Amino acid sequence: PSDIAGLLGWWSPFGYLVAALGMAAIMAAFAEVASQFNEAGGPYLYARETFGRFAGIQVGWLAWLVRLTSAAANANVFLLYLGEFWRPASSGIPRLVALTILIGGLAVANVRGVSGGARLSNIVVVAKLVPLFLFIGVGLFFIARHGVPATFPPPTVPLAKWGEAILLLVFAFGGFEGGLMSQGEARDSRRDAPFALMMALAVTTVIYALNQVVAQSALPVGSMSQRPLADAARVMIGGGGAALISLGALISLYGNLTSQMLNSPRVTFALAEGGDFPPFFAAVHPRFRTPWISIILYAAMVWTLAAAANFRWNATLSAVGRLFTYAAVCAALPALRRWQPNRPAFRMRGGIVFAVIGLLFCAAMITPMGRT
């Protein structure tokens, strides 16, 4: 919220709506393409089956890059919220020590064969959503009682800032493709994938926009810290509210990093087994039977990215990587309709139009990016 407010000011809630519209077109294309496959693999599988092995390797590599930078961005935020309880964690040597304990501990646990699972994921989701719903509920009461600050938005926001903000929001809305990577375990992908994608988009848009509205009503836009929800909760409820929001954020981020450490190394392991990545990524630990080389390399790269760059840099790179994979899936929709018209699938009405809009949205977000 602080990054978006810094770019768009009081137009920030509308930024979420603009990003949601672009993502809706992409997710509509995903809904149709995903419904034609019952195997695991997600965008890597769709690109490989539609456009061949070379395209599959590119999307597989980008999927790994997305997960590296996404985990690094979330580790950055974890350290910021840890600063609510231990201030030195946000900077300097203590930050590197905390990062090493966080990433190193997860890597060691995964090499030894500890796994999470759907039940742990569901527990973490509840632990994340309860504080957020409490924050929104208290915030709406706060707004009803105190009103909103008498600050008016500027007449215009430069187009470049809108682009930068929407790109960051692609990171916020992204990640849904990760659920499709384990699609081989879905009971009915033709029904479940479209419903899950559209419901997720609707729910997250409402939660994100309301969080932004509440945060901006409690805090001056220009003075938001990197922990805006905790600071807003402190204004509305006091120190206990800030601690609750921070604890919810830490639980959520730790659960996300646990899941990433479990799943992401399996991407490179699978690519190596299929001959699409260097073979050492497929090495299995002789005792624990885990892909230990993939795990260690993943953890080392996440640590490096988190230590060397901040949240915004990692999140932006993750978003750009995602946009390339999203564009590949949007392009796959008309190709699959032409080459396999009778394949059983969920057929999105106006699917070609959505795919074109998705491609244009991806191009609009990618083209302004420089080499840095």
Image (cartoon, grey):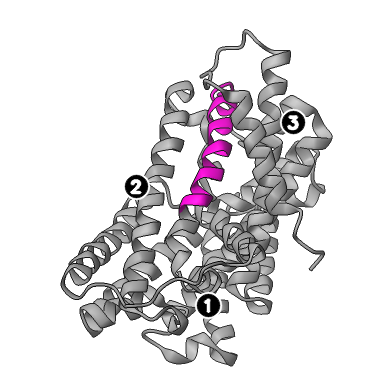
Q: Residue furthest top?
A: 342
Q: Which residue is mark 3?
A: 48
> Where's residue 207, x and y in %?
35, 55
Answer few, some or many: residues within 10 Å of disc 3's Cα (few below 14, many 20 plus, some between 14 and 19): some
Residue 256 lies in the magenta-colored region: no
Q: Identify the image quadrant of residue 310.
A: bottom right
First-in-chain label (1 vs 2) = 1
Query: Could you say which quadrant of the image residue 49 lies in?
Result: top right
- The answer to whether residue 35 is magenta is yes
The residue range painted magenta reads: 17-38
Q: Which mark is residue 119?
A: 2
Task: Please report the residue visible at 43 percent of the width from the left and 52 percent of the height from the top.
Answer: 116
Disc on the earlier residue, 1 or 3:
3
Q: Is residue 94 visible?
A: yes
Mark 2 element type: helix
The alpha-carbon separation of the residues under discs 2 and 3 comes to 31 Å
Question: Which of the labelled discs sits on residue 227, or is there none?
Answer: none
Q: Amino acid at mark 1?
A: Ile
Q: Residue at x 72, y 46 (%)?
A: 363
Q: Residue at x 72, y 32 (%)?
A: 47
Q: Residues within 10 Å of mark 2 (few under 14, many from 20)?
A: few
Apparent side of residue 227 relative to residue 146 in the rendered image (left or right): right
From where the camera sits, is residue 282 visible?
no
Measured in 3D between alpha carbons, the distance from the residue under mark 1 to the one under mark 3, in whole angstroms, is: 37 Å
Q: Which mark is residue 101?
A: 1
